[in-house]
Image (cartoon, rainbow, N blue to C red):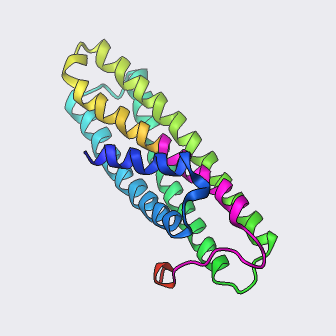
Amino acid sequence: MGAILAIRRYRTFVDDAEGRSLDEYMSLFNRCICMDIVLAVIYTVLGVSSTALHQFSFQSGLSLALNASLVPVIVLWLIDAGLVFSLRGRVADSMGKPSRSTRDRDIIISRKRTIVTNASVCIAFYVLRFALEVYATYSASIFKNMIGSFVALALMCALKTLRLFAINSFGRWVSKHWDAQSAPQLDPSRIPA
């Protein structure tokens, strides 16, 4: 149920970026930061427990690839959380100024692009690891036992991809709403302390 709500929420940003408010984007950024941290923790636990539970040999090439691909996914998710935190702070600072420059806009769009690039690389590593996990479980004849886990992992990938599209839509929003004289105001209660 929560996943369906998240999908709908992300779709509203993708389908109607210009119709969203600044407060909605700030809320999106907060959710993204939390999601990245929580997913990094969950994925770490799942990856480590999967390795321990199925006792993949650390001497096989497949096991080494599985373990090696786990690290960049987790690190990139944590970097993503930091980048979104930085973007959120920059947006809050820029919106708090009486006069907004195109330089502020360009910095915000540049940070958004950095986030999109990082998240795209992360999703690529995630898909690679997912494919390795499917292959490993199929090779070990335990694929049927892991279907539930694979559904959860596929759902995580779909949510991360939609989240990437939602963050990317912020560039369209900024391009439409940014005006050095009358940029949209942020609700002061939403500015992080």
Q: Is residue 171 magenta?
A: yes
Number of numbered callouts drawn? 0
Position of 162 relative to 179 (above/below):
above
Q: Main secondary structure of the magenta part?
A: helix
- What residue span does the magenta drawing correspond to? 161-187
Taking the view exactly as shown, the residue that stands out farthest to the right is 102
Where's residue 152, x and y in %? 29, 35
Q: Residue at x 61, y 50 (%)?
A: 168
Q: Residue at x 67, y 55 (%)?
A: 171
Asked whether residue 169 is in view, the answer is: yes
Taking the view exactly as shown, the residue that stands out farthest to the bottom is 98
Q: Is residue 46 left or right of residue 108?
A: left
Q: Residue at x 69, y 84 (%)?
A: 97
Where's residue 79, x and y in %? 53, 56
- Of 181 and 163, nearer the camera is 181
Position of 47 relative to 17 (above/below):
above
- Of 126 and 159, nearer the camera is 159
Asked whether residue 64 is in view, the answer is: no
Where's residue 14, x and y in %? 55, 46
Q: Is residue 7 left or right of residue 163?
A: left
Q: Is residue 115 left or right of residue 130?
A: right
Viewport quadrant of the N terminus: top left
Q: Is residue 186 magenta?
A: yes
Where's residue 9, x and y in %? 42, 51
Q: Residue at x 38, y 50 (%)?
A: 40
In the picture, residue 154 is in which quadrant?
A: top left
In the picture, residue 108 is in which quadrant?
A: bottom right
- Of 50 and 81, nearer the camera is 81
- Of 162 and 184, nearer the camera is 184
